[in-house]
Image: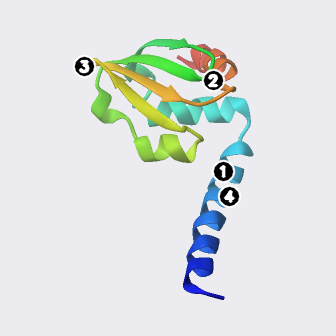
Amino acid sequence: MGILDSLKNRCCTKKATTESSSSALSLEDKAEKFIEALGGSGNIEVLDTCITRLRLVLKDRSLVNKTRLNELGSKGNVKVGEFGLQVIIGSKAIPLAEVMRTKL
């Protein structure tokens, strides 16, 4: 096995493990963990969605744990203005937001 194969296996194995552990969470659990990663329910002023994103207005964007969001399945984040944040989720953004709203 070459060096590239070894690195490829390590990278792919870690990502697969992270994705499988986050996808094993129920929608309820995932919603709670997303709220925590966004700085807690007190940090979220507005929660809206589009097809693939959570659109948020936060009190303090510095409280967001981007690493944790990625572990939970976020594909990336886009800052909008001073307090806005869009979290790219994919096709589960709308059902996730619906559950998150019940917990805010």
Mark 3: amino acid: Glu
Q: Are marks 1 and 3 in contact (CB under 8 Å)?
A: no
Rendered residue at 74%/36% (across/down):
26
* 17 lies above or below 10: above
16 lies above or below 96: below
**In percent of the image, x 69 and y 20: which residue is there?**
95
Q: Give how far across and how far down residue 50 sits, in percent.
A: 58, 14
Side of 69 relative to 96 (left or right)? left
* Residue 23 appears left or right of 64: right
Q: Nearer the viewer, residue 40 or 97?
A: 97
Q: Are marks 2 and 4 in contact (CB under 8 Å)?
A: no
Residue 35 lies, in percent from the top left, at 50, 29
First along the sequence among labels 3 and 4: 4
Q: Disc 4 marks which residue? A: 16
Q: Are marks 1 and 4 in contact (CB under 8 Å)?
A: yes
Residue 38 makes an appearance in the image: no
Residue that mark 3 sits on: 82
Residue assigned mark 1: 19
Which residue occupies 60% across, 41% down? Answer: 73
Q: Which residue is mark 2?
A: 93
> How crowded is the residue under tag 2: few (<14 C-alpha within 10 Å), some, or many (20+)?
many
